[in-house]
Amino acid sequence: MIKTEVVIIGLNDLTQEVAALYPGKKILVIDERNSAEFSHVLDFKDDLLFGVYQSSLEVAQFESEDYEQMKEFYQMVVSMNETQKQDHRKAIRAKLEKQGIEVIKGRVQIENSQKLSVNYLEQDTTVTFESLVLNTESIEKKEDSNPFVFSLEELLATQLLPEEMIVEVSTLKDLEIAKMFSNFSTKVKVVMTKNVFTEIDHLMFRDSIKESMEESDFEFIDKASIQSIESQGSYGMVEIESVNDKVFPFKKESRKESFSVLLRSFEQVAHDFNFGLEKLAFYERASELIDSSSDVKSQSVYVTPAYVHLAKSLLSDDLKVIRVNADELHYFKLIHEINGGMEFMINKQTQLIESAIFYCYDSLVLRDIVRMLMDHQIPMSYFEKTSLGVSSVMSIFVEIAELFRAEV
């Protein structure tokens, strides 16, 4: 039997942050193994998927159409990132154990509001606790048994790069995945069952991203729905219904498409369906704890380039807005990546960044820099004109600081 004060179910990147919210408490982390029959919903916080996405950005710059070469590179990337993911989980566990936090593996079953059991290698361990935090991920409830229909995790597990594929898009994540595979030279047909662009929080950048996506190599089937899917032996056949809004009155049209890979947008359910949570009087969710403890809210959309928006929960009234296109900054001119732009909201009195939006090359690097500036309250006055070379990404902040001082 293990007696503890706080149980955290789930070992991932949030675990350490959650554990830090309980200083002085005895904590047990359970690396749970309850969902073998379901597919995890991978997002770009997942090490495996993020590594594949980053590699897709690199190969997209070369605009290569050599499918065989891309397939070989893709397989190497997926395999390498799976290894890195396992190493990363081991590193998280080692850090927790170094802090005196015990970590065990197993299938969780909650017995009552103070007791649960963990089964691992046919051995049961009883755990008593005072409070419980659920730190598990979402899963996809895959109901389609068609051999040509995949969830994202299933497709990555094959380590095969489809030459052509259909992607059902009903969330921003689906759109991100479609773009990632397109970067690897896959010919992607997108079935838009929902206008996911409305989920992007800034109207001006939303329109830019939509235009960029529509001008890409995708074939968009807009305002569409999947009516039926059949297996024809060596391939699948899907019936797609769409709305033709180029005629009046609008007209519904139906078409059939053959496919070898269809990536569907399955219903997402909480990864706690069989833990017995109903036996608890109260429990916390890790994502809600972390969100409430942070003063900075963020949105990242992993297209090409990535869109990033960081902002304080409460913005001041006395703000100066600085908008600049990438082609106006020396750094981007030097590296010949002049598409996109950025927006800063800077407090006129404190000179602190309160909001920043990036839709340009290196936007993920800029995101991490701005988060550091916001967390440590480093003002724009720090970036005086210096001899800092324009080849450094930090030169962007020197130029933004100059624009800010000139306009305030």
Image: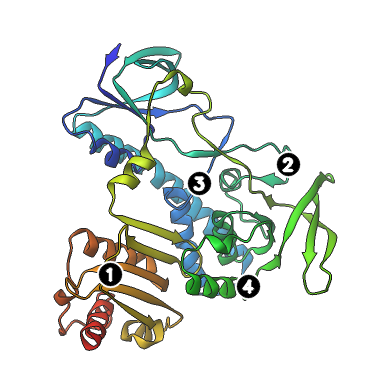
Q: As shown in the figure, which amino acid type bears the numbered disc 4?
A: Glu
The part of the image, by quadrant, that contains residue 245 is bottom right
Q: For mark 4, what is the residue?
A: 214
Q: Is residue 310 left or right of residue 158?
A: left
In the image, which is nearer the foreground, mark 4 or mark 3? Answer: 4
- Asked which secondary structure carries label 3, the reply is loop
Which mark is first along the chain, 2 or 1? 2
- In the picture, measured across the screen, residue 254 lies left or right of residue 43, that is right
Q: Nearer the viewer, mark 2 or mark 3?
A: 3
Work out how far the residue at label 2 is from the one at label 3, CA to CA, in angstroms: 20 Å
- In whole angstroms, how far apart are the C-alphas of marks 3 and 1? 38 Å
Residue 167's place in the image compared with 104, above or below, is below
Which callout, 4 or 1, points at the residue further toward the start of the chain? 4
Answer whether labels 2 and 3 touch (C-beta < 8 Å).
no
Distance between the alpha carbons at the discs numbered 4 and 2 = 30 Å
The residue under label 3 is: 42
In the image, what residue type sits under mark 1? Answer: Asp
Q: CA distance from mark 1 to mark 2?
A: 56 Å
Disc 3, disc 1: CB below 8 Å?
A: no
| First reached walking from the N terminus: tag 4 or tag 3 | 3
Residue 398 percent coordinates (x, y): 22, 80
In-image side of 50 versus 407 (left or right): right
Please indicate whether residue 31 sits to the left or right of residue 72 in the image. Answer: left
In this view of the protein, which residue sits in the foreground, 341 or 46?
A: 341
**Please, what secondary structure does the residue beneath circle 1 have?**
loop
| In front: label 4 or label 1 | 1
Mark 2 = which residue? 147
Mark in front: 3 vs 1: 1
Q: Quadrant of residue 380?
A: bottom left
Q: What is the tally of numbered marks visible in this picture?
A: 4
Answer whether labels 4 and 1 touch (C-beta < 8 Å): no
